Structures are given as structure tokens and as C-alpha cells.
Image (cartoon, grey):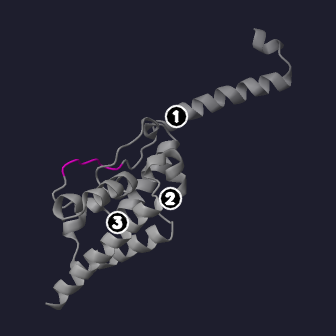
Amino acid sequence: MKFLKLNKKRKLIIVYIIATKLLFVAIQFLPVNKPKIIVTNPNDLIASTNIPKNVALQIKTSCYDCHSNETKLPWYSSIAPTNWFIYRHINKGREELNFSNWNALSKEEKEEKLDDISTVVSGDEMPLKKYSIVHPKSKLSKKEKENIINWTDKLLGSLYLSLIH
């Protein structure tokens, strides 16, 4: 009966708090398009190419959570509404480039993806700044960017030569 004795403003605040908590619990049950995690990927870039170890490590650390099937989801990725953003971001990243499907790409597609990698890395577009804030190890130093760009250029050259022959 204490609730009935409260003034109108306090009642409204209590109802708002309860409604917010109920809404938070309710949204946990909404279906989401959770990305599938597959650890063994025979068509994976690193598993199927002769990529230098330092570049492989840089790509794995900075790119693989969004651009491969080997995503390492953080603990908070199972809590709505955070998971809506995370899962959508991963699914879009995989649509754009999925390193786990590298060998399934044609040579032309690989060339396009390598050119894109070089462009976004050199232009500081990737990894995304908001991702790097939460995952500081994903930030690429100038030297790491150069390593990735040099590797893409080298691989692009070898793909180009194989198209000519």
C-alpha cells in the first residue's frame, strides 16, 4: 500500500523503471541473426596461401572477427540490444569479405578484394575506429599497414601474372 501513498511523480518514475526493466528482459528473447562460428575453414586465406607470418597475425588480429567464420565473440555479444549491432556488423563484414572463403573466390574476385584491402588499410578505413576502441590490439601501426599493403601488392602481382599465362 506504500505505492498508493506516493505522489504522482514518484509513481510515474517507479512505473517507468519497472517498464524499462521488463522491456530489457523482453528484448532478450527477440530472434537475431547470430553469425555462425566455424573454426576449421579449409578455404581460409591463411590456411591456403603462403602469407608471411607477421601479415597473417596482423590480419587475424585486426580483421578476422568481422571478416571470417572464426569470429571471437565477446561476452556482451549475447545481450540485446548490443548483440543486434555486433551481429549485423559481423554479417555485413562477412558479406563484403570473408577470409574463410578465400579459395572459393575467382582470381578476378581475389584481385578486387586485395585491391580493396590495400585501399581501406592505406586510407585508415579499416579496422573501424569504433572496433579499435573496444579492441585496442586491432589497431594497425604504420609498419603493419605497410606490411599488409606490400603483401596485397605482391599477391596482386602474382595473380595478374597467372592470368596472363
Badge 2 or badge 3: first in the primary sequence: 3
Image point 71% across, 30% down: which residue?
16
Above/below status of 63 relative to 160: above
Distance between mark 3 and mark 1 Cα atoms = 34 Å
Image point 42% across, 50% down: which residue?
87
Residue found at the very far left of the displayed protein: 165
Residue 93 placed where, x, y %? Answer: 40, 60
- Which residue type carries mark 3? Leu
Badge 3 or badge 1: first in the primary sequence: 1
Distance between mark 2 and mark 1 Cα atoms = 31 Å
Between circles 2 and 3, the one closer to the viewer is: 2
Above/below status of 1 relative to 15: above
Residue 91 placed where, x, y %? Answer: 39, 57
Viewer-closest of 5 and 94: 94
Element class at badge 2: loop
Q: Main secondary structure of the magenta part?
A: loop
Q: Which mark is residue 26?
A: 1
Viewer-closest of 43 and 1: 43
Element class at badge 3: loop
Between circles 3 and 1, the one closer to the viewer is: 3
Element class at badge 1: helix
Residue tagged by mark 2?
128
Residue 98 placed where, x, y %? Answer: 31, 62
Q: Which region shows up in magenta? A: 35-40
Residue tagged by mark 3?
97
Asked if the stretch drawn in magenta spans residue 85, the answer is no
Residue 116 sits in which quadrant?
bottom left
Between circles 2 and 1, the one closer to the viewer is: 2
Badge 2 or badge 1: first in the primary sequence: 1
